[in-house]
Image (spheres, rainbow, N blue to C red):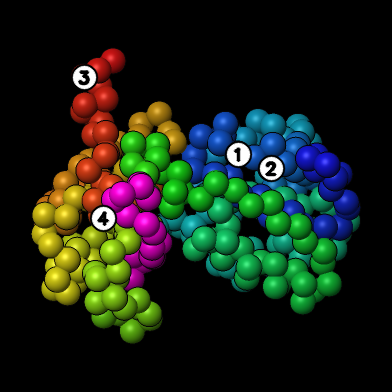
Amino acid sequence: MGTLAPLLPGTVTLVAGGPGDPGLMTVAGRAAVEQADVLLVDHLAPQEALGWARPDTEVLDVAKLPRGRTTPQERINALLVAHARAGRRVVRLKGGDGFVFGRGMEEVLACAEAGVDTRVLPGVTSAVAVPALGGIPVTHRGVVHGFSVISGHVPPGHPTCTLDYAALARSGTTLVVLMGVANLAAIAGELLAHGLPGGTPAAVVARGGHPDQEVRAATLATVADAAAGIAPPAVTVIGEVAAFATPTRQLEETR
């Protein structure tokens, strides 16, 4: 109990790498990396974790960079299957948790269709960990009793957007926005239009878990301006708990 069974040749293990700091990976995740014959790695996976791999491990960069170089998901699926069928112990290393906007289930299904056994090792999702690293609890007794995690990959009103922003605005939950930097102004505007007060505390935590982590505190009305110049990855928190944010400048002044 409590230990990872050895990886078997011809299998795929999906490892969630956590929010950035390799120390926040699970023990089972590290053990899988140490056993891998082939590592397929995302750009948000903790790069220091690659140092745990054996010298002869083949490392494949399958990054999906926002508005940049990207590896199609179909290609990633094909690589997982091909290396497993060649008898290798394949590890797919992602950032955060692969089942929270991580397309992990697509990889599980692709392997299952090809008859390849898979194992899932869940990890610490950035939706909870990154706010915490910025001093923000996504829930707090007497303040808020729930939180909603949404993708900001597409703006409100986009044909593929399935979110009900009116319901979110009146939900009374903390809103945690992943992948929302580019569309933050539109998201904030939509919430304002549906009645969420402009003075609602908000914060953006960029590069959570990394040495250059940055926290910017604001309100719903000002959060898009406050986030100016921030590049992904970043997590936005909207709700009363965002008032607990510890801005980077304040952190620096107390050192």
Q: Secondary structure at mark 3?
A: helix
Tell me the residue that label 2 is attached to: 29
Which secondary structure lies at badge 1? loop
Q: Earlier in the sequence, mark 4 or mark 2?
A: 2
Label 3 to label 2: alpha-carbon separation: 36 Å
**Kind of residue indicated by mark 1:** Met
Closer to the camera in the image, 38 or 17: 17
Marks 2 and 4: in contact by CB < 8 Å? no
Q: CA distance from mark 3 to mark 4?
A: 25 Å
Q: Is residue 123 magenta?
A: no
Q: Residue furthest top?
A: 255
On-image quarter of the C terminus:
top left
Instruction: Name the front one of labels 3 and 4.
Output: 4
Q: Is residue 88 left or right of residue 133?
A: right
Amino acid type for the residue under numbered disc 2 = Gly
Q: Main secondary structure of the magenta part?
A: loop
Q: SS at mark 2?
A: helix
Q: Is residue 160 visible?
A: yes
Q: Which residue is mark 1?
A: 25
Magenta segment, which residues?
A: 139-154
Contact, mark 3 vs mark 1 (Cβ under 8 Å): no
**Residue ID for mark 4:** 238
Q: Which mark is residue 253?
A: 3
Asked if the residue under mark 2 is in contact with the one under mark 1, i.e. CB atoms within 8 Å, the reply is: yes
